[in-house]
Each structure stands twice: as structure tokens, then as C-alpha cells.
Image (cartoon, rainbow, N blue to C red):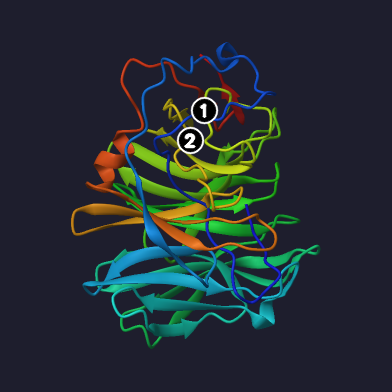
Amino acid sequence: MPKTVCSAAVFAAWACLTVAGPPCLRADDPAPAAAGVARDAAPANPKLVKLPFSFATGMENTPVVFGGRPLLVDNHRPGGFEAKGENAYLFITDLTTGQEVARFGKGHSFVSAFVEGPELNVFATEFTDFGNVINTKCINRFSTADLKTWKQELAIPRDGAEEFFNSSVCRDEQGYVMAYESQVPVKWCFRFARSKDLSHWEKIGGLEFADVEGKTAAANPTIRYFAPYYYVIYGIHCRQKGPWAHYQYLLPETMYVTVVARSKDLATWNLSPTRGPMLDPTPGEGINNTDADLFEFEGNTYVYYGTGDQATWGTIRVAMYAGPMKEMLESYFAVNVPMIRFDAKQRKYVYP
């Protein structure tokens, strides 16, 4: 789900965690049985620790390890609800020194990154206007071997009235898979594309993570693959009616959280049955924990995410799982527990 801010200072991602404490159950929640999972029987969330710092600037971002260095690939989109592409750009920060090491991609936003050997690949949406008027052109790929010379090429062209926002790329046995966010047929949803070389992409027809029946949001996807499963981390509006009834929320004002689902074929997805969403605001984080992206570094997994109110303020924060990413993602899916499914062919949630 895209964000804008009313200052050049920031907004961020979407993101992370359930921590210990009394749950906040909303009065307007449907009965737990409606979601097929009783709250008391739901397994506990894997332990994520929210680290005590934040980034004062930046928006959507992806942490990566490139050339042995931990980097944060980020974007700058000033202007709040009147953001203009001419003022936007992409940049990279060295997470060890805190210094900016690259700036490129003028007119682009909604950035993600993927490292393939000696090459850093950055995907971002080109736009002219964003806010009350939205006008995006396409998703482009930027690639570099030295953070100085960048090659730009078209990745996903616009099709009719469709607008593009966030995207994310992973590798599987067949090549590469992209999940990319759209506002068609549901605001918000995401679709998939495949590539053999990261350069030429083909959209996958007939599969849309779009809740056409319930009209609920599935925004800002981040995709990862650990055989035999694809995992997608995405943001939802938890005040919407839908499959969120079994989750417990920490604050009554919470609006936007991050959830995780997995699939073996990109068509049938299981939604994590844990007690809470993957990422849930704690005091001081506003109403939002979304736009999550993550990397593994020195044996631990770090989730970068955005807080705030989705309108006027926000920061990037980080949560840590003490273990590898594969282990963390697998921990969200306990065995022998009923799970809500999403059918990407029928474009709807299916309850157990």
C-alpha cells in the first residue's frame, strides 16, 4: 500500500512483530469461528525483537549484502500528497558507515533490490505524479557491478489503466519470480511475473493475489523462496472485514499490519495461523507496521519496516529474529493447525 508524507523527511516501509503483552481484541471483530481458527488455540508468533532505533529518512527500502557489505537500497519521494517524479530518486546507504554510496534513478520510487553474484539489481516504479493524482509509467530494472555505472531497462510495462507500486524479486529453480503491486482489479493487490535472466520478464496470467470477493487490501509484497515454498509478506488493512478475525492486536488504534502466507505453486496460499500478525504496532509506532523487507546477515534475520500514520509521519525501524530467514519463515506455519487459504486463480480467501 503506497504511502506519502507531508515533509521531505520521510515515510517508510510496512513491517514487523508481535511482542509479549495483553492482546487488543476489537469490539467489531467477527466471531473467531468465522475465520476457522480459535484465538486460544492459535500458535504463538516466532520471537522478533524490535531494535531500539529508527531511520529518520527514507521510504520503501530493501536491505542487501552486496560485495560483502550490508547496504540499504532506498528511495526519496518528497512532496506528500503532491509528490512529483522530478523530485524523486533512488539511493543506497552503507549500513556500517551510515554514508550514502550511490544515488541514481531520478523519477523512480517504490524500490526493491536483489543480489545475483557480482551484480546488484534494483527494481523501481517510474512515475510523474503520485498522491491525489497517480500516474506511474512502468517498473524498470537498474543493474550495476560497482555502484557507479548503472544500466537501466524496462522490466514490467504498463497495461492499460493499471498503476504500479511496490515490487519484489526472488530466485527459484526455474529462474526468477517477481511479485508486483497493482490497483487492478482490487485496490490494493499484487500479481506475478517470471524471468530467466532478470532482464526479460513475462507476466503470469491467471494468477492474482487480489481479493475480488471481499475487496480487502493485499499491499507491498515481499517475496522469498525456500524450497518447496514461496513466502510472501504483505500489508493489510486490519479494520477491513476479512480473514483477520483470529489475529490479536496490541493496540486498539492499529490500522495497518503485515502478514505472511506461503505457497508451493503461486496459486494456492496458506495464511499464517499464528496468534498475531507478523508485524503489529507497539506504543510510539502509530497505526502502521507495513512495507516490510528483510535480509539475513551473520546468521540473524533483520526485518526493515515502516511505522507512522500512513499520511503525515513515519520512520523506518528494524526487528531481528535470532536465526536464519528460512527458519523464521517456516516458524509461522505450525503443523496440524487449520489455515485460511488464498486462491490466486479464483481470487478469494477460502476458510477451513
Q: Earlier in the sequence, mark 2 or mark 1?
A: 1
* Residue 299 in view here: yes
Helix, strand or loop at label 2? It is loop
- Asked if the residues shown at circle 2 and circle 1 are in contact, with their CB atoms under 8 angstroms apart, the answer is yes
Q: What amino acid is at disc 2?
A: Pro
Image coordinates for residue 263, horizontal then vertical, percent? 41, 33
Which residue occupies 80% across, 64% down? 133
Q: What amino acid is at disc 1?
A: Tyr
Residue 243 image-quadrant placement = top right
Question: Relative to the observer, which residue lies in front, 44 or 1?
Answer: 44
Image coordinates for residue 266, horizontal then vertical, percent? 45, 37
Using residue 81 as the reference point, say whether residue 251 is left or right of it.
left
Helix, strand or loop at label 1? It is loop
Count every numbered label the image shows and give the total.
2
Image coordinates for residue 287, horizontal then vertical, percent? 61, 47
* Residue 114 in view here: no
| Residue at numbered disc 1 | 247
Which residue occupies 64% across, 51% down? 182
Residue lying furthest left in this view? 298
Image coordinates for residue 64, horizontal then vertical, percent? 33, 65
| Residue at numbered disc 2 | 277
